[in-house]
Amino acid sequence: MNTPPTSIPPENIEQDLAEAFVQLADTLVDDYDVIELLHRLSANCVRLLPVDAAGLLLSDQRGTLQVVAASTESTHLLELFQLQAQEGPCLDCFHTSAPVGVSDLREDDTWPRFAAQASEVGFRSVYALPLRLRRETIGTLNLFARQPTALPASQLRVGQALADVATIGILQERAIRRREIVAEQLEGALQSRVVIEQAKGILSERGNLNLNQAFDLMRRHARAHNQRLSELARAVTDRSVTVDGVPYSASDQPL
Amino acid sequence: VTSGRVSDAGELTQVLADIVAEGGPEASRRIGEICISLLSVDRAAITLMAGPDRQEPVWASDAVAARLDELQFGLGEGPCVQAFSERHPVLVPNLADVSDSRWPTFATEAMATPVRAVYVFPIQVGAIAVGVLDLYRDDPGMLDKDALGAALQVADAALWGLLDSRDDYSNNLRADGPDVLAGFPLRHAAVYQATGMIMVQIDSAPESALAALRAYAYAHNRPIAEVADDVVARRLRFDEETS
């Protein structure tokens, strides 16, 4: 956690909400990158809701949930999201297609392993909201707060609306009439995230950076060069691009 | 062939793990045959690909499946080519549906065979894409949810099988214990990240980096995810290891 949560005065919330949704709607009209959209969406959750971290998990359609985006790419946070593939609010939310929330994890013993790890990272409160398309649930939006936090219904609705935007973003611009397209797009989004992880590894090794810095550099480069994050990551893996700020070593020239 | 169902996901995982563990030239055939016996499909094929127009058939269940693969690569269009280029599955529950006009020539020619539905899964993990798993059914319809999950798992297993057949690092590598494969360690962020780091360390393509990671895990009898964690934490380097 590098940045403390910014609390928005109540009178500004409406305007902020409107701006966030206008920005997201703009993105959806354009040629956009799914992972970048989900990353921004996670950041919006932290800005608009009284939570300190947010992340998105998608079904890998093989029976497991996978992290695809988070408000902060810290390793501990990603591990906490990923742990929920086995136990925790996201798994329960995914299976029931219903929101799951615990305002104070110390008062709750539903998921002992998850609660222990959450507390180690400094979180007291957790929510999981389903990413739903009609009767299908494709993943979950996960929210964490450092303080015991009971989200009122109005804020849960905002969270659910952001989760719905994520669903639309993942399934992309097509009208999803057919179930097979959901399966195709979902696997495509997961593979995009895998390429980004591989590219993070390459850049961190090449530039002697930590994985978080490697991710930030890649995002910055993508924005500066008006390139999709996933395409940039793919170019990094086939060595057809030099990312700003990451030197090539003598033994590692582009092919 | 009775169209079987995958009754138990754990059972499938175990069967696939065993096949990958035994390895050898028969692995692709055995992986392909699982699709026929456990998923509700009539035909299947596995094709190695190095580009949209560079492919090599590895296994086909029968002449029709082999012909449909050949046809696509000859035409340069079809669900296999698209799945490989776009890096996501391409699922065509009804070839006769004209509204799905992505590959008109292929669809017309394919309708001359008994096949009515096609489901193609890239054999891939991120930047590593080695081929496609093609499943064919003689009547139209969508794979159900269980069959879809099973097909994705089969494609994951096929990746390990094909890495064996392609890469020098794995030539002498026959047996991963099921532990090494347990829960498909491919689905683990550190494995992806370590693959990228090893690419730079040994100056290799991602396939070779993953194969090297796997060979190390095998040689030291450790789970691949744990070795990957060491690489990411910079406790283990492959430029020192392999020289």
Image: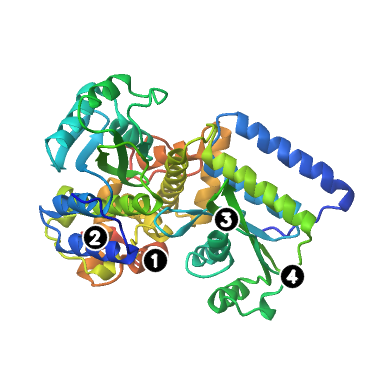
Instruction: Indicate whether A19 appears above or below A62.
Output: above
Circle 3 chain:
A
Q: Chain of mark 4?
A: A
Q: Earlier in the sequence, mark 1 or mark 2?
A: 2
Q: Chain of mark 1?
A: B
Q: Which of the 4 quarters of the picture holds residue B121?
A: top left
Specify whether B19 is left or right of A116: left
Q: Is residue A6 visible?
A: no
Disc 2 marks which residue?
B16
Residue holding disc 4: A147
Q: Earlier in the sequence, mark 3 or mark 4?
A: 3
Q: Marks 2 and 4, Cα distance to the nearest angstrom?
A: 45 Å
| Spot occupied by residue A44 in the image (x, y as percentages of width and height) | 69, 48
Mark number, residue B229: 1
Q: Are circles 1 and 4 on residues that touch, CB within 8 Å? A: no
Kindly report the distance in space between the C-alpha atoms of the residues bearing marks 1 and 2.
25 Å
Rendered-image quadrant of the C terminus of chain B: bottom left
The span from disc 2 to disc 3 (Cα, nearest Å) is 29 Å
Instruction: Name the mark nearer the viewer: 2 or 4.
Output: 2
Q: Secondary structure at mark 2?
A: helix
Residue A250 percent location from the top left of the image: 33, 45
